Image: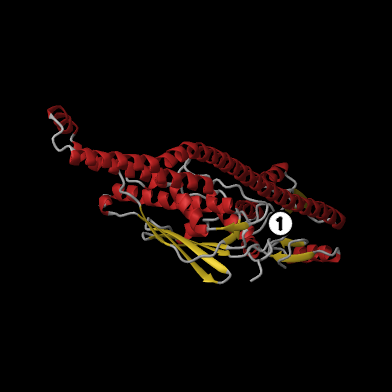
Amino acid sequence: MNDPQNLILVVDDNLNNLKVLTDVLREAGHRVLVANSGESALEKVTKATPALILLDVMMPGIDGFETCRRLKALDSTRDIPVIFATALSDSVDRVKGLSLGAVDYITKPIQQDEVLARVNVHLKLYNLTQELEERVAERTEALQTTLDQLKRSQLQLVQSEKLSALGQMMAGVAHEINNPISFISGNLPPARDYVNDLLGLLTLYQHKFPQPGAEIEQCIEEIDLPYLREDLLKLVASMQEGVNRVREISYSLRNFSRVDCERPCPFNLHEGLDSSLMILQHRLKAVSDRPIINVLKKYGDLPDVECYAGQLNQVFINLLSNAIDALDDSIQSKKNSGSAALAFEPLLQIHTTQINPDRVSIFIADNGLGMSDATRAKLFEPFFTTKPMGRGTGLGLSISHQIVTEKHGGQLTCDSVLGEGTKFVIELPVHSQTSPQSAD
């Protein structure tokens, strides 16, 4: 009786009326459920949902009008069509019944053809309405899904375009930096040799002419020659260190901005991680309301991994940025709660290891606030974010998950304990399934 397609509930306190209506409806092929009171009818509809209710008006206890009112008050039964069966001919009673939500009346003594005609019409209308609502719901769901996919694709496109523009800008900056740095780097070694030669010549002069005269003695004192000789070599060494540092930055920019090939190519994951850290270096430094974020790297001995390097760099940036956000939020939360925020030492850990000959893993962990199980369960859903408006689109982790799982055949998982921190684990195959493996 749980199939509501043609189940009709007949409610009447008169057993003769119940029998007549039941026989008429069953002979016409309908399934019938009976109730001899309003109370019984309300109880039965909780167990089996009819497609139509024939309801007597004049009944002891709860009359037909009150029964109809209660049926229409329930979400589960409000849409079931109700036809009153009554001997009343007063138009006021008919209006009252219709105002309570009834769709029609049949009069007693009943006319079989009239009953069947009205019942069939309202059953057909009810079933058509249900079918239409289902189609509308399906179409609405399909449209919503399409809209979500469109939004996701649009934001992915925007993010890809931003990354592409950023990569082009970085590549351009790296190229422009490289030229003067190469010039400086190329001239520093001979400059250092020249300085050493001049200092050597000066030492020889001092040895050969220990008494250079009052004017030279005065000049030596004014320029503090012993300090100058010592510091000049330090300055040259410092310039060399600065050049090396700029070279590293230039290399990181070029490495991060590398354009993906059509097929996965071998890539050093550690270079990608280091380049991403270099890009985010400004966010790791100490600021007025937060100490420096220490980074603990524990790199294993990894082979080059066949992958789309640019896309994996995007994943690294997303995960590292989220970890930094979590650490910043931890500081703010401790301040708001009156805890000793200055005693908190924010830590970002990056570990890599080779699980087996065919698989590697990278985990990125922070000691921030962590998250609840409910939040973690939705973490990779598109558009889900815990960040305030303007700070996140809710696509970073979703896109990262898609890149790791769909583009690379890997896994991206999250382990988090509220109040202790969060760890993301990336597992990647060493050899891409979309490119031929090199023969061993």
**For residue 211, above or below residue 11:** above
Task: Describe residue 390's horizontal placement relative to residue 330 as left or right.
Answer: right
**Residue 121 point in image, percent of width and height:** 82, 51
* Amino acid type at mark 1: Leu
**Residue 103 point in image, percent of width and height:** 73, 48
Residue at 78% across / 61% down in the picture?
Answer: 6
**For residue 224, above or below residue 415:** above
Task: Describe residue 13's horizontal placement relative to residue 190 as left or right.
Answer: right
Q: Nearer the viewer, residue 400 or 378?
A: 400
Label 1 sits on residue: 55
Task: Describe residue 8's horizontal placement relative to residue 292 as left or right.
Answer: right
**Residue 40 point in image, percent of width and height:** 63, 64
Q: Is residue 381 visible?
A: no
Residue at 46% across / 53% down in the picture?
Answer: 274
Q: Nearer the viewer, residue 153 or 35?
A: 153
Given the current orientation, which residue lies at the most extreme front position?
208
* Image quadrant in which you'd find residue 236: top left
Q: Nearer the viewer, residue 371 or 405?
A: 405
* Image quadrant in which you'd find residue 347: bottom left
Q: Count how many numbered circles sit on residues in the image.
A: 1
Q: Nearer the viewer, residue 45 or 20?
A: 45
Q: Is residue 38 visible?
A: yes
**For residue 401, above or below residue 191:** below
Residue at 85% across / 53% down in the picture?
Answer: 117
Task: Describe residue 117's horizontal placement relative to residue 164 as left or right.
Answer: right
**Residue 76 point in image, percent of width and height:** 63, 56
Label 1: element kind = strand
Residue at 81% across / 53% down in the picture?
Answer: 124
Quadrant of the rendering where the C terminus is positioned: bottom right
Quadrant of the rendering where the N terminus is positioned: bottom right
